Structures are given as C-alpha cells and as structure tokens.
Image (cartoon, rainbow, N blue to C red):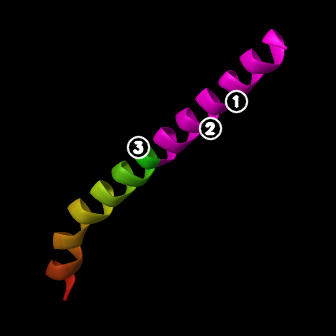
Amino acid sequence: METAQLAEGNIEELSTWKRERSIEELRSFVTERLTSLPDDDDVE
C-alpha cells in the first residue's frame, strides 16, 4: 500500500514538473517571438 501511494505521489510530481516545464518553454518561445516582432515590422 505504502509503495503504491509513493508511486502515485511521484507521478503527480512528475506531471506537475512537466506542466511547469512546458509553461517555461512556452514563455521563452513567446518572449523570443515578441523580441523578433520589431524586426518584422522594420521589414515592412
């Protein structure tokens, strides 16, 4: 029983980490896009 609960906790931790990880990646991606936007405007 105890090991099952431990495994459950680890899985929850892992999914939380994955979620935070993807949010970080999204944030950096958006930041990169926003910083490159002025260049696009200059081209026009």
Locate residue 4 relative to residue 31 in the image: left or right.
Answer: right
Task: From the viewer's side, name the closer residue of 35 and 5.
Answer: 5
Looking at the picture, which amino acid does disc 3 mark? Glu
Looking at the picture, which amino acid does disc 1 mark? Ile
Residue matched to label 2: 15
Local secondary structure at mark 1: helix
* Residue at point 85%, 14% (across, down): 1
Q: Compute the Cα span from label 2 to label 1.
A: 6 Å
- Magenta span: 1-22
Task: Report the residue that reaches farthest toward the top.
Answer: 2
Q: Compute the Cα span from label 1 to label 3.
A: 20 Å
* Residue at point 43%, 48% (across, down): 23
Q: How many marks?
A: 3
* Residue at point 49%, 39% (across, down): 21
Residue 5 x %, y %: 75, 19
Q: Quadrant of residue 24?
A: top left
Of badges 1 and 3, the one in the foreground is 1
Q: Are marks 2 and 1 in contact (CB under 8 Å)?
A: yes
Locate residue 1 relative to residue 23 in the image: left or right.
Answer: right
Task: From the viewer's side, name the closer residue of 16 and 41.
Answer: 16
Circle 1: is it few (<14), some (14-19), or many (20+) Cα within 10 Å?
few
Residue 11, labelled with which disc? 1
Q: Quadrant of residue 6?
A: top right
Residue 40 against residue 31 in the figure, above or below: below
